[in-house]
Image (cartoon, grey):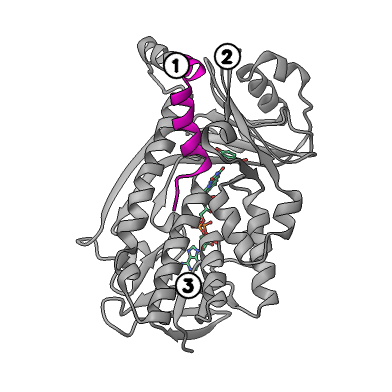
Amino acid sequence: MRTQVAIIGGGPSGLLLSQLLMQNDIDAILLERQTRDHVLSRVRAGVLEQGLVGIMRGLGVATRLDSEGLIHDGTVLSYDNDVVRLDFTKYAGKPVVVYGQTEVTRDLYDLRERTGGQAYFECEDVTLQGMDGDAPFVTFRQHGIDHRIDCDFIAGCDGFHGVSRQAIPENVRTEYEKVYPFGWLGILSETPPAHHELIYANSSRGFALCSQRNANLSRYYIQCELTDTVEQWSDQAFWDELKRRIPEEVADNMVTGPSVEKSIAPLRSFVCEPMQWGRLFLCGDAAHIVPPTGAKGLNSAAADVHYLSQGFIRHYRDSDCADLDRYSERALERMWKTERFSWWMTNLLHRFPGQSTFDQKMQKAELAFLAENEAAIAVLAQNYVGLPY
Ligand code: FAS
Ligand code: PHB
């Protein structure tokens, strides 16, 4: 087989890139390790920046997003029973859209099928070869049959645990990492949201987040120990702990119910530099990870895809490699600012093991300053709604 761009990974990064390339008559083949249903079974991000909404609309795949997505003009930060509302539209000029990553992925897979895009599932032993030359290729096995794809470029969109990042030689790569000493225990419940906007709660017992997917599907998280397991947390134990961490008035009025999904995610900040090597380009979680406190994982993947697709389009349309050559520089410039914001939000809202009473006072003072200073709110709002591409 031969294609122009071989895309490794069929999550949001790979799907967005494949469709943007197709829209510009650039041939791409997408290779996914799992089945489509497995990919769609994942419950991940919930907040979309306008940049990602714009890409979806540009692809003509935002009909459901525009009809079912929830426009959120703000969010709430709480510290025990003190609350601060951050008005995104007032301080950052635009809202965010609450629409699950699962639905984004579903819409993009439906689009790929409608447009006849090539996607191979259950690909095993994907290997990347020849990226440091001008004839890269990918090999993989599917249902016991070995395949080879010769290509011009390879896009590594295979997430944090994929093979693409490892294909960059260790002496070329520099990896920056911070692992947080806690995780997020998340549940999905078919109950009405506890509040019309998201609530990010800092409490003496730890962080909690009240999020949502639609009028009858809510997503909640509580900070948990890294050693916790899902089995240790009954639904009732989760609800009881969540209620202890959010403002009393919200807790007293919230509707609880059985979890339809329950999972624990570790938190880390991670960046690989560079995000390109020869004919290989990394996108999304393959190159970087943020703690979900700033709702930036999916959205930063979209920003990478924006830059990389521009690079490929300019290369094939204008025989100009300028944007491709500076992809890593452009993507990392925005990504490090996103890493900072996600790290800052995580430090502001979580209780760290062994945290001193002074450090807790610093968190309280930061939130108190946010409550009274419009410039401080504006900085947070502009980061939360998404930095410009
Ligand atoms: P993804 O990991 O989504 O997709 C990579 C794809 O590559 C996967 O489908 C995988 O099966 C495939 N793959 C891996 N190895 C392969 C190989 N060798 N060959 C072929 N395919 C291969 N972000 C938020 O903003 N908010 C959240 O609340 C949030 N929660 C998260 C919870 C969890 C448990 C995780 C892991 C992430 C969470 N994220 C969250 C971040 C998440 O949304 C990512 O940022 C987003 O999925 C990035 O998309 P991709 O870069 O496509 O990576
Ligand atoms: C979610 O709804 O899954 C969600 C929302 C905001 C975050 C993280 C997760 O910061």
The answer to whether residue 380 is magenta is yes
What is the magenta range? Answer: 367-389
The residue identified by callout 3 is 7
The residue sitting at 44% across, 75% down in the picture is 313
Mark 2 and 3 residues: CB-CB less than 8 Å, in contact? no
The residue sitting at 33% across, 50% down in the picture is 333
94 lies above or below 84 = below
**Nearer to the camera, 309 or 243:** 309
Q: Secondary structure at mark 2?
A: loop
The residue sitting at 42% across, 66% down in the picture is 308
Residue 331, given in percent of the width and then of the height, sits at 37, 56
Q: Tell me where residue 254 sits by quadrant.
A: top right
The residue identified by callout 2 is 80
Residue 192, given in percent of the width and then of the height, sits at 79, 33
Q: Work out whether residue 161 can be spotted.
A: no
Instruction: Assess disc 2: are there few (<14), some (14-19) or many (≥20) residues with their C-alpha within 10 Å of its C-alpha.
Output: some
Q: Who comes first in sequence, dot 1 or dot 3?
A: 3
Q: Nearer the viewer, mark 1 or mark 3?
A: 1
Q: Tell me where residue 76 sits by quadrant.
A: top right
Indicate the amino acid at tag 3.
Answer: Ile
Q: Is residue 276 left or right of residue 207?
A: left
**Nearer to the camera, 146 or 222:** 222
The residue identified by callout 1 is 369
Q: Secondary structure at mark 1?
A: helix
